[in-house]
Image: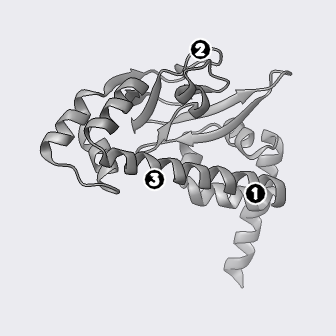
Amino acid sequence: MYPDILANVARHISLTPNEAAFFTTLLVPQHIVRSGALLVAGQRAQYLTFVVRGCVRTYATDAHGKEHILAFATEGWWCTDNAAFFNRAPATLALQALEATDVLHLGLDHLERLCQQVPKFERFFRILTQNGYQLLQRRLEAHLELKAEVRLSQFERQYPRLRQRVAQKHIAAYLGVTPEFLSMLRKKMANWRAVLKLL
């Protein structure tokens, strides 16, 4: 489990063996069964979570009971309800494993201790936050400006293997369309690709 998260960290900062060993002592491993909850809306978000294996969806449920998926986290991605985690507040978002999933959790107290004792982690988590906000901004802009076909194409580029791993209803909820409309879109796009191959 630890080589995966250490490789993720190494993309942005270099750790000494002692720093790496200290970091891993702060992590809490957990296995979540398929459809199991990592975080329930209304509960306190205790952890920032790294996905070692599996797939997690982050979603909100509106007043009518409709689910809106904000993000998917697969191998090498981090997830949490950021506002709830950093403010020690009840979560407004929920996290659920869409398949059997192994994760490593980092609590806020341990995160603060880590950044105090190994200051270079401040840079790592700053980069992580910047990347997350950029991704969120692009997603919001896409929902405001782009047609569903373009949003689907972007989704398939961003998450190339999720089509085989995630139920169509979850992909539809992420794109903001119905499963029936998503099915129609996919057929239409498959026809376009077939025509392009013939040209």
Q: Secondary structure at mark 1?
A: helix
- Quadrant where the N terminus sits is top left
- Residue that mark 2 sits on: 43
Q: Is residue 191 left or right of residue 82?
A: right
Q: Residue furthest left?
A: 17
At numbered mark 3, what does the secondary structure look like: helix, strand or loop? Answer: helix
Q: Is residue 66 above or below residue 173?
A: above
Type of amino acid at the residue the image marks with label 2? Gln
- Which mark identifies residue 142? 1
State left or right for residue 151 relative to residue 161.
right
* Mark 3 in CB contact with mark 1 (< 8 angstroms): no
From the top left corner, tell me how far across and down residue 150 is, in percent.
75, 62
**In the rendered image, which residue does mark 3 sit on?**
127
In the image, which is nearer the foreground, mark 3 or mark 1?
3
Q: Position of residue 189 (x, y in %)?
A: 75, 63
The reply to whether discs 2 and 3 touch (Cβ–Cβ < 8 Å) is no
Q: Quadrant of residue 186?
A: bottom right
- Tell me the kind of residue under disc 1: Ala
State the residue lying farthest toward the top. Answer: 43
Q: Quadrant of residue 90?
A: top right
**Which is more foreground, mark 2 or mark 3?**
3
Sequence-first disc among 2 and 3: 2
Under mark 3, the amino acid is: Ile
Q: Residue at x 59, y 14 (%)?
A: 43
Of 19 and 166, nearer the camera is 19
Q: Does the image show residue 97? A: no
Q: Earlier in the sequence, mark 2 or mark 1?
A: 2
Q: If the image is split into quadrants, where does the C terminus sit?
A: bottom right
